[in-house]
Image (tube, rainbow, N blue to C red):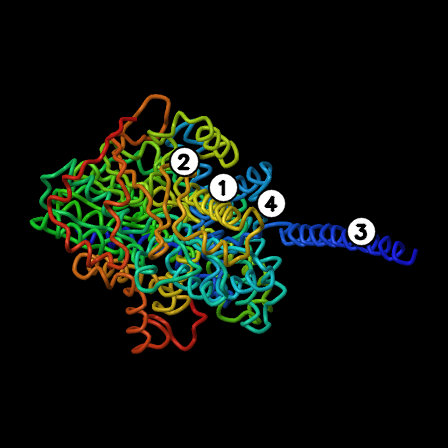
Amino acid sequence: MAVLDGISYAALVFLVSVGLSLIFGVLRVVNVAHGSLYAFGAYLAATLSLVIAQVSPWLTYPALLVASIVIGFVCGGFIERFLLRPLYGRDDVLQLLITFAAFMIMDNLQRLIWGVQPIFAAEPLKLLPNISVFGVNYTSYQVILLPGVAVATLFGLRYFLRKTLAGAVILAVTEDREASTAIGIDAQRVYSITFIIGASLAALGGALASPTTSLVPGMGADMIVLSFAVAATAGLGQIEGTALTALMIGLTRAFVIYLQPEFEVLVPYLLMVLVLLVRPFGLFGTLQMRKI
Amino acid sequence: MAARSTQVKNGEIQMLLLKAAVAAGLVITAFTGAALAQSKPPEIKIGITTFLSGPASVFGVPAKAAAEMIAEDLNKKGGIGGVPVKLSFIDEGAGGEALVSNYRRMVQDEKVDVTFASISSGSCNQLVPVAEDLKVMNFMWDCGAASILETKKYRYNFRTQANGTPEMLAVLVYLLKTKPDFKTIAVVNQDYAWGRESWEIFSTALKALKPDVQVLAELFPKFGAPDYSTEVSRLLALRPDVVLTTSWGGDLDTLVRQAGQRGLLQQSTFVLGIGESSIQRLGKDLPEGLIVGARGDHWFLHPEKKNDPAFKAFAEAFKAKTGAWPIYPVYHMAQAFTALQAAYDKAIKANGGNWPTREQVVDATSGTEFATGFGRPVTLRPEDNQGLEAQLVGVTKSFPGYDFKLLDNMMIFDPKVITNPAGVRSVEWLKTLKPEFVKMDVPTFKQ
């Protein structure tokens, strides 16, 4: 039973962390505002779901996707274009500070737009039946749909980066920006697109979480810490590593809750410490961290 | 001639002296009067700490709205002793260091006359000694940790509401009175001071009142955890008769919904220790039959008050302003204001109708009984400045006209019976309780 709980938790963590990792891999930006994108995705998805459910509950699924893309394009696009672009090539600390400022501003905006009372929109989850495993009920949303989306994202990203032309372009810019610019690739555009994809993944994590959890002020801050821990353990920029680490954290967390619940909070950080002690660049990381 | 003129002169002198005496008297009276009028301040400054950010703002923001409403209403009626009140707020969500320095600034630079601090027991732990050092009167208006006033006697700090001990004990006694036959229990509390301390109170009392109950699981998920699926799986597998949670805010909403979706709420009797504040948000997701505590006798349909015009008017005004019926932090805020008014009124009376000094107000606050009109009166116990506040506990039930569950079969517990005596630590007192304690007579009210 703990395995199923672990997998569903890992799926959400993976979606958010892989976006963070992707952005770092290509742009070399540690995006602190990633947690806010997660929260915005969740809030917008819940708002759209609540409205669209009046028409048809099944339309709430497209609403989740629409919310992720809108947040990815609007918020992600804005952050990349107006906050990060002027800073490329400058000190890393500046990027860290500016994304932290974006996080603070978005946190306030979130309260301004959606208030402080918890919001909940469980429509998509209620549409799917429960399934019983060894006499314990599970929602199929959490044990089938969420892991399904995570696996699809993992393979989708792999396929996109390794088999498509656009992916090859992104990899080229990641490997050597100067050389790729010399052969006519618009590196700036690649950065924008990658950031929007990463931001959309954070928002997708939030949107998919929205039917299962209460949306409250501060939810973004928690997720940013967790996704940093996952991305760092995996090795920044490592997609498969992120998936494996998220799974490790999810499963370990579930087993710990069963066996020694007091240690639940420590799980991601203990794993991070253990891994980084042995492999300082993360499970899959290398000294050349820009590879994805 | 000379003698007569001397006589006249003497008479004139006497008249002059008399006039001078009268004039001097008048001048003194006038000056003294002016001096007294001047000592009445232009306003009473109240500094309030409340959560304006972070997850706890689900309590802090409605409380701020309530404070503003109450202050406006108070000032319309002439203020306290004819002096209007002025509010300033500090965000408790800014963290410990910032909170303490902001608090000092508020007391020393803004020169507030009184502070209402705080929601979180963590904040109270930090600010109570500071208030004592700064000699500013402080009302712990919402924090629940019983230990704060049990470990030290304070002069300037008062708690204008109950603490975790009567709050948890009332819920437990309600459970034991209504479901006396349960054999097993599990707890899912937030992993921080309140979650831990409320379970310590509950479990200590449970051991004393019903020693045969087996505790199947003690789960303390992270504060603000977004996912309880593993906890729910474990409870579904363990099948406890009763599940207690003292969580609140988004955490409680998430737990209840995730448990409900997977049938756990039907499998076990759920006890929401301080669930009153979540009822409206949970709406249809909250099933019938859950035991809900209210952290005081707070309920917008209070059985003893619901027909009172002022009670109804306040609830409706609050709903119009914020979109929701008042929840317990709103009423706790009202208690702090009423306590302040009662203390000033008492101090003014004791001072012969003149404006009291700060120390006189502090003296008057001790032992004050005050009634907000929103629940039963509260007494500030003089021995330890702890508020004695009644506790309301009920069970959820559907009623027509409401799209959320209401409380039914409510019991209102007498605070004197369920609060530990002054000078005895809560946990020590709870250990001395006997199973007969549950047989106490408590009135039950239908919705």
**CA distance separating discs 1 and 3:** 63 Å
Q: Which mark is residue B84?
A: 4
Judge the density around disc 3: few (<14), some (14-19), many (≥20) Cα neighbours within 10 Å. Answer: few
Identity of the residue furthest to the right in this view: B1
Q: Are marks 2 and 4 in contact (CB under 8 Å)?
A: no
Do the residues indicated by labels 1 and 3 lie within the same chain of the protein? yes
**CA distance separating discs 4 and 1:** 17 Å
**CA distance separating discs 2 and 1:** 13 Å
Tell me which label, 2 or 4, sits earlier in the chain: 4
The amino acid at mark 3 is Met
- Left or right position of A12 against B31: left
**CA distance separating discs 2 and 4:** 22 Å
Task: Tell me which corner region of the image, top left, top right, bottom left or bottom right, holds residue B127.
Answer: bottom left
Q: Position of residue B298 (x, y in %)?
A: 36, 38
**CA distance separating discs 4 and 3:** 47 Å
Judge the density around disc 4: few (<14), some (14-19), many (≥20) Cα neighbours within 10 Å. Answer: some
The amino acid at mark 2 is Phe
The correct choice, above or below, for B356 with respect to A141 in the image is below
Taking the spot 50% from the left edge, 37% from the top edge, the residue there is B322
**Residue position marked by numbered label 2 in the rendering:** B374
